Amino acid sequence: MQANVSIAAPRRDPLAYLLLVAVGFLIALMLPLARIAMEAGMSAMAYAFWQALGGGALLWLWSRPTHGRLPAGSYRYFLVSGLTAIAIPNAVAFLVVAQVGSGLTSTLYALPSLITYALSVMIRLDRVSVLRLTGLLLGVLGCLRILVPDSNGISVDALPWMLFGLLVPLSLAIGNVYRTVAWPVGAGARELAPGMLLSGALLLGVVLMASGRAGDVLVSGWEVAPVLVAQAVLSALAYLGFFELQRRSSPVFLSQIGFVIAPAGLLLGYLFFGERFGLEIWLGVGVLMAGVLLANWKP
């Protein structure tokens, strides 16, 4: 599979920065909705299934009238993208969170940027840059400060699960690079976003059936239905912007979306649930933002 050079090459595109912030905020906005659904009795895996299926279905219905036959290689692209961006990260994270808790599990999402950068350098999509590497390291440190403010370290029992959980950032990083180098010629975000979401929903459905939990996809009461509808709309908007961001930037730039999700999640936690955060948390936000500025600084 040959790379599409015009997609892989980083560009000075102001819209890419706006998309990075907007998509990160939309993904962060999904978290309060997920919490509401979990509190109503829906399992995390079932919610992830509906998130992918609902968003994918809306985008498919929107794009269907204006597009004909899909470019060659699209279905393979959908399957690999759905596997690396949705099915594997969600399945592994949900297994790990049951063993070590949400705080430590959340730290896994601070790592894709560094792994994506390493993979991009290895296949010559990006060049070695001390400034960028320093910025990404600062961003990861800021995320860790935000996500595990009271952690005293990883216990002996939790360590094997955290090592298994490294499949989450590894899968996300591989997906970031793959979606760039394998981007089907002539395809746009409107075709690719629904394909990835629907493939992810299919794979999650297979996992649910294989584990004997297919019944979890049933909505737990009518109060969850509005949440699922809102989640579907947010998912459609977020992943449409996600693919447009991928088209306009590089895998490393895209991977920094996690650095937007962390502070946006703090803000939304305060607005939706009245969560309060201490000075150390906001210090982590400052370190994170400094890292983002360094990673994207162009002399």
Image: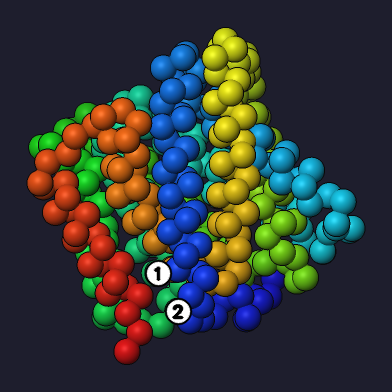
Res 184 seen here:
yes
Type of amino acid under label 2: Asp
Q: Position of residue 37 (x, y in %)?
A: 48, 22
Dot 1 amino acid type: Tyr
Q: Is residue 51 left or right of 155 when viewed as pictured?
A: right
Callout 1: SS: helix
Query: Residue 85 location in percent, x, y?
Result: 54, 49
Which circle's residue, 2 or 1, is located before the other in the chain? 1
Q: Quadrant of residue 112?
A: bottom left
Residue positioned 39% across, 69% down in the render: 118
Q: Which residue is disc 2 drawn over?
A: 126
Query: Which residue shows up at 57% across the image and 32% down it?
Result: 230
Tell me which residue sits at (34%, 56%) in the image. Answer: 259
* Residue 43: numbered disc: none
The front one of 220 and 21 is: 21
Do the numbered discs 2 and 1 sit on residues whose CB atoms are within 8 Å?
A: yes
184 or 279: which is nearer to us?
A: 279
Question: What residue is pinned by disc 1?
Answer: 117
> Is residue 177 visible in the rendered structure shown here?
no
